[in-house]
Amino acid sequence: MTQDPLVIFTPSGKRGRFPIGTPVLQAARSLGVDLDSVCGGRGICSKCQVEPSFGSFPKHGVEVSKDAISEINPVEERYDRVRGLKPGRRLGCQATIQADIVIDVPPESQVHKQVVRKRAEAREITMQPSTKLFYVEVAQPDMHDPSGDLERLIAALEDQWQLTGVKTDLHILHVLQTALRKGDWKVTVAVHLGDASQPPKIMEIWPGYYEGTLYGLAIDLGSTTIAAHLCDLQSGEVVASSGLMNPQIRFGEDLMSRVSYGMMNPGGDQEMTKAVREGMNQLFSQIAEEAQIEPHLIVEAVLVCNPVMHHLFLGIDPYELGQAPFALATSDALHLRAAELDLSLHPAARVYILPCIAGHVGADAAAVALSEAPHKSDDLMLVVDVGTNAEILLGNKDRVLACSSPTGPAFEGAQISSGQRAAPGAIERVEIDPVTKAPRFKVIGSDLWSDEEGFDASIAVSGITGICGSGIIELVAEMRMAGIVDGPGLIGSPEQTGTDLCFLDGRTYSYLVWDGSADGGPKITVTNRDIREIQMAKAALYSGARLLMDKFEVDSVDRIILAGAFGAHISPKHAMVLGMIPDCELDKVTSAGNAAGTGARIALLNTDARAEIEATVRKIEKIETAIEPRFQEHFVNASNIPNSAEPFPILGRVVELPNVTFNAGGEASGRRRRRSR
Amino acid sequence: MTQDPLVIFTPSGKRGRFPIGTPVLQAARSLGVDLDSVCGGRGICSKCQVEPSFGSFPKHGVEVSKDAISEINPVEERYDRVRGLKPGRRLGCQATIQADIVIDVPPESQVHKQVVRKRAEAREITMQPSTKLFYVEVAQPDMHDPSGDLERLIAALEDQWQLTGVKTDLHILHVLQTALRKGDWKVTVAVHLGDASQPPKIMEIWPGYYEGTLYGLAIDLGSTTIAAHLCDLQSGEVVASSGLMNPQIRFGEDLMSRVSYGMMNPGGDQEMTKAVREGMNQLFSQIAEEAQIEPHLIVEAVLVCNPVMHHLFLGIDPYELGQAPFALATSDALHLRAAELDLSLHPAARVYILPCIAGHVGADAAAVALSEAPHKSDDLMLVVDVGTNAEILLGNKDRVLACSSPTGPAFEGAQISSGQRAAPGAIERVEIDPVTKAPRFKVIGSDLWSDEEGFDASIAVSGITGICGSGIIELVAEMRMAGIVDGPGLIGSPEQTGTDLCFLDGRTYSYLVWDGSADGGPKITVTNRDIREIQMAKAALYSGARLLMDKFEVDSVDRIILAGAFGAHISPKHAMVLGMIPDCELDKVTSAGNAAGTGARIALLNTDARAEIEATVRKIEKIETAIEPRFQEHFVNASNIPNSAEPFPILGRVVELPNVTFNAGGEASGRRRRRSR
């Protein structure tokens, strides 16, 4: 007796023997090979394309002859004629096995395909969306055995797709009968697959085979901006990205001022809820228009945000978040309907909101954890999301700690005398000559240094208007390296520093960066008060990280990841000179860009990732800096540049900091204050 | 070693031994005795009242001394002072066991108490509502272990009430934090307990202990009227009943004219949906006002209706129900939210709609089945819900069959020359003297027969205006019994009948019932055309029942139940003389009143009953009369009065029908037409 042909699927390597004539799709399914199909093997959807390989495969121990697969059949021929089939490709539901064969499943035919992320070190995203399309053939009504059209559709989904317990949204009932009859009892339905607490639900129905795709939104709702990525829920591809200012800004720039607005104005929280939801809807129209799709094809949205934004978006007064013990109304992940949040998406669209970690550590921090995955790391990772409030995660696969620290808006250029938002004209990079003490710099909008030829022309339009967050970090660090500022944070006098760029400015000295006054431009300086603001901001950030290291019982970390749009622009060396982040090998300090947005995208495309981050968040140890006595001690030490207590030996090997002291017994170098949240 | 005291609970008879000092509530719980508690044994709610019995109980084998229960404690004393405790009653959570004792749980302390129904033969309703109140003490927020207020509330529900997987509606998050703090971390929550496809959900929250109760609505949405009972979800009591005309009447009196309205007028179905929902909301305000409760305390509604009403209420175009194969959009029971149906109840209120049996046999018929329970009957029961469309159920605990039959509106007085709705002035009861052939009758609004003294005065206000449905049934039957009408349905001439009350009226004879023309009133007659209308209506009803009997392979039934408001007024004898219902012992023909409304109430108060009727409906065998060849044959036979083929032997023992024939070779007695639905 001869054996059935051996079928080997690549890249999975899954193999099995099947009788001659078995369709490839059927063989794939019975082996659990990841091969897509929307039409269920009816030769309609073409999602099950495979590529048979021929020749000798010593690795697999098979010889594959040209006739190991059936000849192209009329269904494939028609498909090729109408839509075109790539050379070598076959429809898995039509081609049948004739002899031993090796069959490749190309990435686009895999359901659980990998979505490529830009950063090499980032983990891949595996497609596992919550909503999928299913083509079904539904039994016609029978007077002898009356049943509802819906019940027969549900029976077809169970019978043809093994989906059990499927329910439907009411709106489907309004269009169901027409769709079934228009499609001659063949329809495509979008089914939200549900989870432990909710059954699968039919979200949309189309007569016949629906050619299109479904979309989802990954939304990062920040205090200042709302950013969204529109993703294809089948390929995982980002088809459009867009953003707009958070319309809540008119109620207050920072979180605390919005909490206060709600406290001072009856109904103020509801105004803010309305504003942010309207802003979201505006963003949705904008992004749908950009992608040229109908907004109702957006069936899902995943949202990440800080706790105050979280509560205001949900219509919860954030009052309790403004005072100890900073109690969240709810901390777990939320499964909501777009309609109950007044969001203009598909009428049955779902909204998933990641869990909050604590009263100051929100769903955005959870999303950063999902994207950067400290809980999966062998190395001890420090992840810092730099913003008005810094969220800090420290951990590895054994244990993850989290806290937040109120850095204030200095890193965003606010409360700095010449500070400004990152925009054309802002100084973003700085170098100070250690001998002449003169600065050179780069300005957003130009690639040239200020002492290079053509610089003036390149900034003719923008001018030089101020210093942005990353610029002030480099500037203060360079001033420290050049001996213009001492460890405690005092700017030296012209005599002490040997440069007239330092000048008496009231009771302290300031440093002149750029004098544009001859051309009617600003005079850009760093005042000693600016230094103090940066000291406090960086001390808050460092002491949060240091506190987590104490709890973890370590004195150093293996890797540091700077997350957030701002984090992407920070120079690791300057951040370390400033003592903003712990001592670490410079090449181990990397930027993750908008990690919160990436986390939202992962949760959108992969429902397993939702379960993963929910479990991770439950296990994260939350540290409340406000009630940790050592936080104050760390803060005092970290007010020095880089630090009055910590040695920073790794930094010491790269940079030598001049040992200067400008204190003439005046202002106390240890002065500190804690910013209110 | 002495044994622990023996505790015997009545009426359950459950018994067990417990250590001295065990609270009665705790003993009850560990024995599974049905003893209510909302506060969980904290001496707040007083729902756990019990009555200890003292003395000798030879039946139980115990002697109970006066000190077998602890003395009244301060909590009970305070409760008695403030609210009053009935003599002999104790709070089960405070009183503790001291020696052998017999403890009675009075009905009002039972969760699953029996709700008394008016009819002796009807089964009891056991309380098992879907929404219940729970008092909980919630842990306060802790900065060292941050969690959301909701998550701590959910943990408290799990810990204190063993409710697992509880979710919440979004609106609870808006009020949660305030309620918890106002109640000093003690709150009462209303929880919808969920079912197989939905988790338990928090629906409402009150600070501290909530004294009030929750309400539910049982709604019978008829083509003509919408009737609702408002029920206390704790006691099961009906606290108010109300009804109004279905505002859809302006689009058509009967179902088919409404289906046509939808077909002829684009958007007509949506107009009708809007109208019926507005009508429901009006009814809700009306009933809440009557009961003097806030409409938002109504957390649940159960709805029964025929398939066309079902679809129009849900916003589904009933087009398909107007033509074969009469396909329902959905037939299963539906769990919906009041908000998605635009109903003004509690914001999170749920709506449960019973399953439809078939395209012509709706949720109202399912409700009748639930109320009359043929599927639990040893006898073979025929249940007939008489209306424009008659729903007919035949079965016993082995097997239940259902069909509907288009009787038309004749039984409601329509299409009858002197017909009218049942209202004051309508003739409702009739007797014809077999000798004089003269009628006497009763009129709605008067208790006197027309030949009794004082009759004229008693009807002075209403007058005598026409004949209602039950009146025309009695009249035609009496005419048959008096020999005025023959078997085939012809009215005899004065010569043939021997009375001048029969008179030539066009080509056939009519019978004069009342001549009010001298006083400016109407002349009330029965024309031969009226007889034809009644013949067709009763033939349709009978042939439906007979068809089910064929399918069941029986020639007689044990019991007949006439359901529906109209059914309550039908005289069994006259209905049988007419041949409207099968031959049966007269005392086995009973009326169930508004059985559909009762079924709705059962489903409202007992969630197990929902599962029961859903399972029953799945098992009911549906017969579509339109495609059954024998239906036509039965219809022809049943056009005779009582029947040209069936002998009606039991009726024969009670009533002797004169063997007259008035046919002079004119109109064919077998003439028939089928009414369109």
Image (tube, coloured by chain):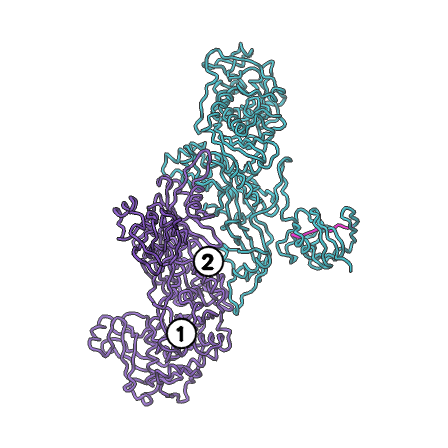
Chain colours: A purple, B cyan
Residue B612's quadrant in the figure? top right
- Foreground mark, 2 or 1? 1
Q: Main secondary structure of the magenta part?
A: strand
Q: Residue at x 62, y 56 (%)?
A: B39
Q: Where's residue A193, x and y in %?
A: 43, 52
Q: Residue at x 45, y 31 (%)?
A: B254
- Tell which residue pokes out farthest to the front in this image: A1
The subunit letter for the residue under badge 2 reads A
Q: At label 1, which amino acid type do we have?
A: Arg
Q: Which residue is mark 2?
A: A334
Q: Where's residue B674, x and y in %?
A: 45, 25
Number of callouts: 2
Q: Where's residue A10, x and y in %?
A: 35, 57
Q: Nearer the viewer, residue B623 or A336?
A: B623
Say if the magenta span includes residue B500: no
Mark 1 Cα shell of 10 Å, populated few (<14), some (14-19), many (≥20): some
Magenta region: which residues?
B47-54
- Tag of residue A96: none
Q: Earlier in the sequence, mark 2 or mark 1?
A: 2
Looking at the figure, which quarter contains the N terminus of chain B?
bottom right
Could you say whether the residue bearing mark 2 is in a helix, strand or loop? strand
Q: Nearer the viewer, residue B245 or B289?
A: B245
- Tag of residue A559: 1
Say if the magenta span includes residue B53: yes
